[in-house]
């Protein structure tokens, strides 16, 4: 036990000195430690196999512990948070310039942001000294400016004295010495004040970077039904905003697809682990048909095609405020362990970064792009129905819509409505029954000002399931990615608004088609008419 205690003290020292990171491989010596050891205040070191780790802290203030999978040598689970050390780029790097956050806005709207955080059910990151620190920052800044202004005047006076001395052949060295003496005293004062300013600004910056976006007035405490798409007679007769889906095990997509030979979960689990799958034959063809139909529809709607990378620098993910939220409020991404890179959970991230550090002309906006990518998410939800089959998987194909607009809320909300209309028409054309929801305060991701989800009726699951989402992020992302436009009216540079929306989350739409269009009597899956040109003109899928 004495040996164990000494080891604990050693690890404690290394952690405090930042020599060891939060997750680290262990040597054989560490196997003498018990499974759970309290290393230091608020750090409870856990040993599982050959790996040690301690709890991460989430954006919402809740503490969670996740087990690292030793088999994933180059991948580790990490929380993509808006915590102080990852909220936004604090320093300019080769990839991104320092985020330009609005400290004054946070100061002026301190109470409003406090209420917004309460509504979102997240911790309020501005501490009690924030307002006093901001006021002190302004005073220090004013002092620095005054000293610099006075220094400039003194330097001009010194220059004039030298000119007079040379022109009139007089000795004014005494006056010059006095000015030089003053300037020499000003320099360390300005240097010290600048150091104080930097420390204060960094402290305030970190807090403001952790603030979520504002909330649109139409967003309420509870989700709100806007409309149904292709409602069934039963839904119409129910006259309810919360129609309860009855489960029908005969329509379970996993059973149907496995029996038809369209998917192989068993072999994928052996090869990659739980949450992965093979699409086979017409199952793979159905995915490709959905991709092509979604891309064609988006291009027709004026979206420019893009194929973004699926791996980005971690700082880009953080600058986007990326935080996909599920029913367990878990937020995870796959991170490449030694390269400061991560696998993207959505094409939204690389698409947003496509115009990082860019200044648009107002004539270039709005700019609309549709991106196709593989998406990777370490989370797989709680055990049960949400993880069954294709509903919640680690890797999937996604067609994403992304827009940049002028920083006018009327214009960006107009584009928001256009994206939602596209999504509604896409689902309607597939013949799927769905509902359109304005999501509540606590379902908004940190960057989102307003979010609308479309959920499809999934009878095999016995539930509604989200298949698309649209968010207006205002200037939340553009301030962190430094994407601006010059306003033609006053010639000033302003931060653009960014919006993102799902054109097609492919596995969930495949799931929806299987569960809604399987005919038990004929034992066939009817292919939606709009997909048949991309399915070798097949109207039905039969067991293979």
Image (tube, helix red, strand yellow):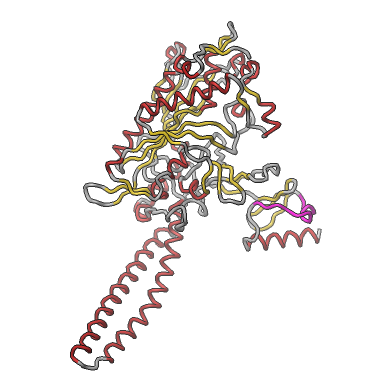
Residue at the (39%, 22%) spot, across then down: 425
Q: Quadrant of the C terminus?
A: top right
Is 139 located above or below residue 304 in the figure? below
How far across and how far down the image is residue 125, in percent? 47, 52
Is 53 located above or below residue 266 in the figure? below
Is residue 31 shown in magenta?
Answer: yes
Q: Which residues are magenta?
A: 23-34
- Report if residue 225 is visible in the image: no
How far across and how far down the image is residue 502, in percent? 45, 31
In front here: 11 or 73?
73
How far across and how far down the image is residue 231, in percent? 43, 15
Residue at the (54%, 47%) spot, across then down: 61
In front here: 113 or 408?
408
Report the side of 82 relative to 76 (left or right): left
Residue at the (78%, 52%) spot, across then down: 31
- Report if residue 239 is visible in the image: yes
Is 285 located above or below residue 450 in the figure? above
Report the side of 91 relative to 410 (left or right): right
Among all residues in the image, which is located at the extreme top?
521
How far across and how far down the image is residue 194, in percent? 40, 69
Is residue 348 shown in magenta?
Answer: no
In front here: 124 or 15?
15
* Number of numbered discs on residues: 0
Q: Quadrant of the N terminus?
A: bottom right
In front here: 114 or 488?
488
Among all residues in the image, which is located at the extreme left?
168
Report the side of 472 relative to 175 (left or right): right
Report the side of 494 relative to 288 (left or right): left
């Amino acid at each position: 036990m004495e040996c164990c205690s000494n080891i604990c003290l050693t690890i404690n020292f290394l952690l405090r000195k930042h020599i060891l990171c939060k997750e680290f491989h262990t040597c054989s010596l560490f196997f003498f430690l018990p499974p759970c050891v309290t290393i230091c205040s608020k750090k409870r070191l856990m040993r599982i196999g050959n790996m040690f780790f301690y709890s991460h802290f989430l954006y919402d203030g809740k503490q969670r512990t996740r087990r690292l999978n030793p088999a994933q040598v180059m991948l580790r689970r990490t929380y993509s948070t808006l915590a102080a050390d990852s909220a936004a780029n604090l320093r300019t790097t080769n990839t991104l310039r320092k985020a330009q956050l609005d400290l004054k806005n946070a100061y002026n709207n301190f109470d409003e942001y406090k209420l917004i955080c309460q509504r979102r059910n997240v911790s309020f990151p501005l501490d009690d000294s924030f307002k006093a620190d901001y006021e002190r920052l302004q005073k220090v800044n004013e002092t620095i400016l005054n000293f610099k202004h006075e220094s400039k005047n003194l330097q001009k006076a010194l220059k004039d004295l030298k000119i007079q001395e040379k022109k009139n052949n007089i000795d004014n060295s005494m006056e010059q010495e006095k000015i030089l003496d003053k300037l020499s005293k000003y320099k360390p004062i300005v240097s010290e004040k600048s150091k104080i300013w930097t420390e204060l600004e960094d402290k305030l910056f970190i807090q403001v970077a952790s603030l979520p976006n504002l909330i649109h007035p139409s967003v309420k405490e509870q989700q709100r039904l806007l409309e149904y798409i292709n409602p069934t007679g039963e839904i119409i007769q129910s006259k309810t905003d919360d129609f309860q889906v009855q489960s029908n095990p005969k329509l379970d997509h996993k059973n149907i697809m496995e029996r038809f030979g369209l998917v192989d979960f068993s072999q994928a689990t052996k090869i990659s682990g739980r949450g992965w799958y093979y699409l086979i034959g017409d199952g793979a063809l159905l995915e490709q048909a959905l991709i092509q139909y979604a891309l064609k529809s988006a291009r027709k709607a004026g979206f420019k095609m893009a194929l973004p990378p699926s791996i980005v620098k971690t700082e880009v993910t953080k600058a986007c405020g990326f935080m996909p939220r599920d029913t367990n409020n878990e937020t995870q991404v796959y991170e490449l362990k030694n390269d400061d890179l991560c696998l993207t959970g959505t094409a939204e991230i690389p698409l947003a970064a496509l115009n990082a550090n860019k200044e648009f002309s107002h004539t270039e906006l709005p700019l609309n792009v549709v991106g196709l990518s593989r998406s990777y998410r370490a989370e797989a939800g709680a055990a049960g129905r949400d993880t069954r089959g294709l509903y919640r998987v680690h890797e999937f194909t996604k067609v994403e819509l992304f827009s940049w607009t002028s920083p006018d809320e009327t214009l960006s909300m107009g584009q928001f409505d256009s994206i939602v209309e596209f999504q509604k028409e896409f689902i309607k054309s597939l013949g799927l029954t769905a509902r359109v929801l304005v999501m509540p305060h606590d379902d908004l991701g940190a960057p989102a000002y307003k979010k609308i989800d479309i959920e499809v009726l999934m009878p095999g699951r016995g539930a509604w399931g989200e298949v698309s989402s649209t968010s207006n992020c205002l200037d939340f992302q553009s301030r962190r990615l430094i994407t601006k436009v010059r306003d033609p009216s006053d010639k000033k540079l302003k931060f653009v608004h960014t919006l993102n929306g799902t054109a097609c989350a492919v596995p969930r739409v495949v799931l929806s088609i299987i569960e809604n269009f399987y005919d038990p009597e004929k034992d066939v899956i009817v292919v939606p008419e709009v997909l048949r040109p991309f399915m070798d003109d097949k109207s039905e899928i039969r067991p293979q």
